Image (spheres, rainbow, N blue to C red):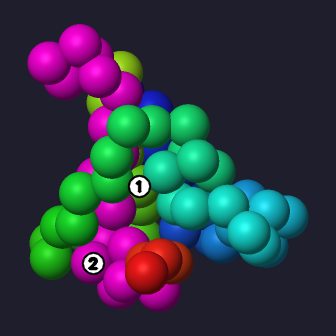
Amino acid sequence: MTRLSCTAVEQMMNQRPDATLEAALEVFEVFASGSLTDEVYILDDVGGKRIAIAPTALKEKYRRG
């Protein structure tokens, strides 16, 4: 499991303004967590896929569509 600060994720998104949060984190899907506040967790093998769990506010900020 990898942990990234929300600040680091914000910097990644600023460098790639047209990318989705999933593309920037190189994951299949990003799930929101109401209990997380300052970190994003990246899990390498959940059902054979790489996923991330991010604070709800961060996921909503970069929501596309």
Q: Position of residue 28 (x, y in %)?
A: 38, 37
Q: Which mark is residue 58?
A: none
Q: Residue furthest right?
A: 15
Q: Is residue 62 above or below residue 39?
A: below
In the image: residue 35, left or right of residue 23: left
Q: Name the quadrant containing residue 49.
A: top left
Q: Which mark is residue 40?
A: 1
Q: Residue furthest front?
A: 65
Three-letter amino acid code of the residue under disc 2: Thr
* Sequence-wise first label, 2 or 1: 1
In the image: residue 23, left or right of residue 55: right
User: Which residue is rendered at x = 43% and y = 81% of the image?
Assistant: 65
Closer to the camera, 29 or 57?
29
Q: Name the quadrant containing residue 30.
A: bottom left
Q: Is residue 19 above or below residue 47?
A: below
- Secondary structure, mark 2, is helix
Mark 2 closeness class: few <14, some 14–19, many ≥20 residues within 10 Å = some
In this figure, what is the number of numbered marks?
2
Please say whether residue 50 is visible from this viewpoint: yes
User: Which residue is tagged 2?
Assistant: 56
User: Which residue is rendered at x = 27% and y = 78% of the image?
Assistant: 56
Magenta stretch holds residue 58:
yes
Q: Position of residue 26 (x, y in %)?
A: 56, 37
The region drawn magenta spans 45-61
